[in-house]
Amino acid sequence: MGPLVPEFINNELNLVFAVLIGIAFGFILESAGFSSSKKLAGVFYGYDFTVLRVFFTAGVTAMVGVLVLSHNGLLDLELIYVNPLFLWSAIVGGLIMGLGFVIGGYCPGTSMCAIMIGKIDAMVFVLGAMLGIWGFIEGYPIFEGLYTGYDFGIPQVSQTLNMPLGLFAFLMIVVAFGSYWLVGIIEKKATKNVVVDTTSKRSMIVITVVALIIGLVASTLKPEKAMILDKINDSAYTSSFEINTISSDELALRFIYKDKSLQVIDIRNSKDFQTMTLPSATNLSLNDFFTKSSKNIFNLEDKVNIIVGDNDVNSKKGYILAKELGFENVLQLKGGFNQFKSDIIDFKSSSTMEANLTDTQRFRREASSIVPVLIEKSKPKVIEKQKVRALGGCG
């Protein structure tokens, strides 16, 4: 995934971006009139809904932008931080925030914008906010139960409704522009037809139609990661894919001769991996293939990556995914771990077979006593499944 998250940008460059984005954000707030407490409070009294229009537009624009970036493989959605939902603190905090907004005329971000142009009421607002923060910190033991009560994790509307992200984006655009038309009617009634928004009705119709077209296009977009995973689950696609395989016998032989170029990528679940795996194997799920740490593992110089799943089907999926992501020097263990275990580790020859053993059977008999020892001596590697999420938010 692309360089739009801290995992790909060092901390020093992050600070530079933060300053530039902060300046741009403040400029937009001031240009939109958000340094005026009267304009901000207008949304509560029904005479000016600029706040709703600006933030709703920013929200749907960012949403479409994220979909486009994700569709083109430039952004990993799993690295975007989503605030966890603590129900009681969300309700109480929302009420306090709303009350402070309507009384003071600012939110934390807009108050800082107003301070920069010398607004005294904004300075008082920020002072009150700082006192509130200090009081919360000092009284945290008292508020902790409320603050952490009813933890709902990180619910998302699209996931809760089992809805594709593109469809959710389109519906949000419909809701946004529907609300713009509605609040326009409310403004006219509240101001007795005094013009508040200079946008003509014809221009608004054109903007709405364009936005809906963009929404329809966005509804067809899927994250690159989801598209690739869909491909490897398509039997028609996988059956036509050319696979380079390695047999259980050849792999066992290379283990015995201590071939240092081998790198086993075990894609089974962690429980099965911990129970038994192949010598010096690394445990990765298919989702882990998309991470930066996995790319570093696959791209080690002079290494041959052996993809091992439970069976031939799963091993094949892992191989195809690795090739789709551009990884080189990849082989699939034919038959997967189960086949290797049956052919090599669990191979048994009866006394009646001894005189008629083939060369392959003789090798498997020898390997069945050597490979388990190599497995016992090797230390499997479990990659920490830690995601570096890009923190963010709005004041």
Image (spheres, rainbow, N blue to C red):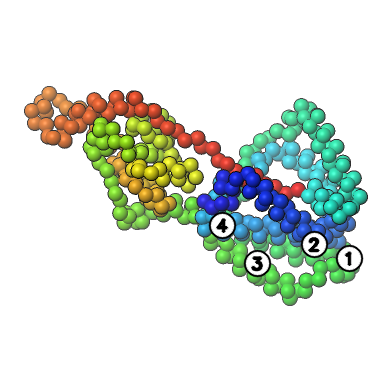
- Label 4 residue SS: helix
Q: Give the alpha-carbon distance from disc 3 to disc 1, as whole Å.
A: 28 Å
Residue at numbered disc 4: 69
Q: Earlier in the sequence, mark 4 or mark 1?
A: 4
Front in this rendered view, residue 59 or 260:
260
User: Please, what is the three-letter code of the amino acid marked with disc 1?
Assistant: Thr
Q: Give the alpha-carbon distance from disc 2 to disc 4, as whole Å.
A: 27 Å
Residue at numbered disc 2: 31
Asked whether the beta carbons under mark 4 and mark 1 sit within 8 Å of each other, the answer is: no
Which residue lies at the image location 73% right of the left edge and 61% below the top edge?
179
User: Please, what is the three-letter code of the amino acid marked with disc 4?
Assistant: Leu
Asked whether the beta carbons under mark 3 and mark 1 sit within 8 Å of each other, the answer is: no
Give the answer, above or below, for where 234 lies relative to 251. Answer: below
Image coordinates of residue 285 in percent, x first then y, are 44, 41
Image coordinates of residue 50 in percent, x first then y, are 80, 61
Residue at numbered disc 3: 211
- Label 3 residue SS: helix
Which residue lies at the image location 77% right of the left edge and 74% below the top edge?
200
Query: Residue 332 vs residue 354: left or right?
Result: right
Image coordinates of residue 80 in percent, x first then y, are 60, 47
| Tally of numbered tags | 4
Residue at numbered disc 1: 191
Of tags 3 and 1, which is closer to the observer? 3
Q: Pointer 4: residues within 10 angstroms few (<14), some, or many (20+)?
A: some
Front in this rendered view, residue 388 or 221:
388
Q: Give the alpha-carbon distance from disc 2 to disc 3, as whole Å.
A: 22 Å
Q: Earlier in the sequence, mark 4 or mark 3?
A: 4
Q: Earlier in the sequence, mark 3 or mark 1?
A: 1
Q: Give the alpha-carbon distance from disc 4 to disc 3, as whole Å.
A: 18 Å
Of tags 1 and 2, which is closer to the observer? 2
Res 307 → quadrant: top left
Image coordinates of residue 283 in percent, x first then y, are 42, 36
